[in-house]
Image (cartoon, rainbow, N blue to C red):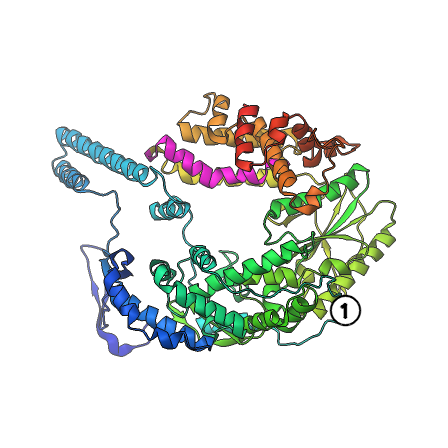
Amino acid sequence: MLTDNVENVLRFNQISVPNISHHDLIFASLDFDTTKTNNDVFYRDYKALDPEIVLNKFNESDWERFYSITNPDVLIDMFNNTLNSIHEECVPLRKVRKSKNKVNPWFNSQIQIAFIDRDRAYKKWKHSADSDDFARYKILRNLSNRLVTQAKRSYYNAQFSGEMTTKDFWHRIRHTGLGKPNSNIESDFNADEINASFQRHFTSQIRTITHDPRNNNDRRFAFQPVRIFEIINAVHEVKSNAIGLDNVPIKLIKSLLPLVLAPLSHIFNNIIESCVYPQVWKLTKIIPFRKKSNVCSLNNLRPISIISAISKAFERILKNQICCFIHENNMLSSLQSGYRSGHSTKTAMLKVCDDIGVVLDRDSKVVLVLLDFSKAFDTISHSIMCHKLENFFNFSRNAVILIHSYLNNRQQAVFCNNTLSSFLPVSSGVPQGSVLGPILFSLYINDLPNVVKYCSLHLFADDVQLYLDCTKKSIEEITRLVNFDLEAIRLWSLENTLKLNATKTYGIMISRETNVEKPLLRIDNESIEFVDSANVLGFTIQNNLKWDKYVLKQCGTIYAYLRVLYANGNLLNRSTKIKLFKSFILPHFISSDFLIGSTSVHVQSRMRIALNSCIRFVFNLRRLDPVSHLQPMLLGYSFQNFIKARCCILLHKISTTKMPGCLYDKLRPFHSPRAKQFIIPTHFSSAYGKTFFVRGVVLWNSLPNYMKNQQSVSVFKKQCQEYFN
């Protein structure tokens, strides 16, 4: 026996036990304290708010003095004190005592009695070994199992019956154990270690832009005074219940919204007028999440910012004003697809792959380089950000000062393992998890396409795809041209305090041929590795521009979900199974809808077989039962018509919204506007003939005019369902 504390060992001995074992028995008595685990869980009952008591408590504050103050930090301090006082005194604290032994929610007294009778019968049979007692035990055992199955079935189906919000649906999914478990943020590292690791990525370098392409638009952007309806919308758009370091829950703000509208309006407008962002809103609680669940490393952690709920609402108002100005003046590059309405990873991938497909259609090849920035959101320079806002996007001086105040002098603390670390300064970057962060990053990186001279480029936030048409170019010329643009991007990155990661940057030589000679590409004297396939924006792109790997990967994901759902399949009714199919599995059919038509017949067959497996799960059918006629029950169409309808729906969105512009520009309408038809792109190969912009245009032109003239997307979807069925 080994111990590091001998004083705790009260007794230790070795004795023989001849009737039990030939070995001696070693035992020890230890002295240690037992800590009683507190199983109580507390929550605030907002439904029990007494309006009269809340109003009296609210009126106790000195609001006359409040409206005379112009310092945002003092205003926030007074406002938070009032709300925290109301929260503590007027929102009842309820206690829920959790049982030490977890009790299943479907367990009832009838099952408990059946278990007792079953166990008694089992003991009687084991004691008597009588066949009649064994038969009695089997009857009670089967009865117990039948009662458990019935209780589970009633519980699960009751959970998912009737109308419910999306949030309630996913909450019940997690509560019943049918979905993935919550991300585990327990870590082997302490909070201070994690916070120090995150801080190492920040940069304190202050740089200035050498090139200054001022926008020709004379109109300057200035933040406008906030109106009441904007506050109402912004507060209700805050969906997360996470509480920031000011300890003001969004639930409390929503419950008291009629009372706090005037104070919030005064605070928000005062911040805009003074151009000072409150310091308490710049204190951020960081929650570390693993990028890969099976990797235990500080470099594998991603910081997610938990900021004040009131700050989120205010950021939403500022973001809406910025986006409105940027959109009206068409200032964002058409080559940026990240964080923009009408844009997605699907549309970004469609643009890049169609550009490459056009080149391959001419029997040529393309060099594709997938660039990776290290910690891009954490390393942007605040001074460069403000310079770009003022000179590239025509922000007024006051607007720039407010954004600088928002970014500057921030501090963060990591919350992990129920411990809050000490605060460390944030010298660069935008908060990940904030509302303003994504749009500010898009503006920061917006001028990157301007430095590329020979290649084409597309952005999705910090994911950059650089590609070159190799038609009539020697391998030496290809190497020179791509390396020239890579060096220009590297220099731009250094000037903008971003760092290209050559080890995570990959090249793909895309061609219909095999064994194509590859150029020697470098970033800062580090060679770029060429691969046959790579993950881009969630898609798997191959060196022959086929999508077999990606679609087969989706099939694997579908079967993985089916295995999870089959574990409780006998407990769910049909309507519940359909809801689960649409929540877990249907998105994987939709994500690959524009690619399935261009895959091989074998791969399309695999996708159809996966759909048939889903049908067998939903309708409790056996392996050899016919299922094709039931495909419309899940997809709304047969499998082939589903692919056609999804192409038409995507084309309808692009043509009616004219977004994304880079895709809308690929559509060439007939000269007659009445026809509402597009010219089919000229192509020379059957491979390009299967792509979206050929196959989709052919399908679109075959639709009746009343469908093509329909402006509503929802109505067009219903018309597609009628037309293709």
Mark 1 lies on a secondary structure that is loop
The residue closer to the viewer here, 532 or 329, is 329
x and y percentages locating residue 176 in the rendered image: 34, 45
Q: Residue 146 falls in which quadrant of the image?
A: top left
Which stretch appears magenta?
A: 571-595
Q: Residue 254 falls in which quadrant of the image?
A: bottom left
Magenta portion: prevailing SS class: helix
x and y percentages locating residue 77 in the rendered image: 40, 75
Q: Quadrant of the N terminus?
A: bottom left
Is residue 307 part of the magenta span, yes or no?
A: no
Q: Position of 9 compared to 282: left or right?
A: left
Q: Position of 721 compared to 141: left or right?
A: right
The residue closer to the viewer here, 585 or 129, is 585
x and y percentages locating residue 260 in the rendered image: 37, 64
x and y percentages locating residue 706 in the rendered image: 60, 27
Label 1 crowd (10 A; few <14 / some 14-19 / many >=20): few
Residue 62 is at least partly visible in this image: yes
The type of residue carrying mark 1 is His
Instruction: Decide: is 662 above or below 422.
Output: above
Q: Position of 232 compared to 81: left or right?
A: right
Q: Position of 88 compared to 269: left or right?
A: left
Is residue 585 part of the magenta span, yes or no?
A: yes
User: Mark 1 = which residue?
Assistant: 211
Residue 561 is at least partly visible in this image: no
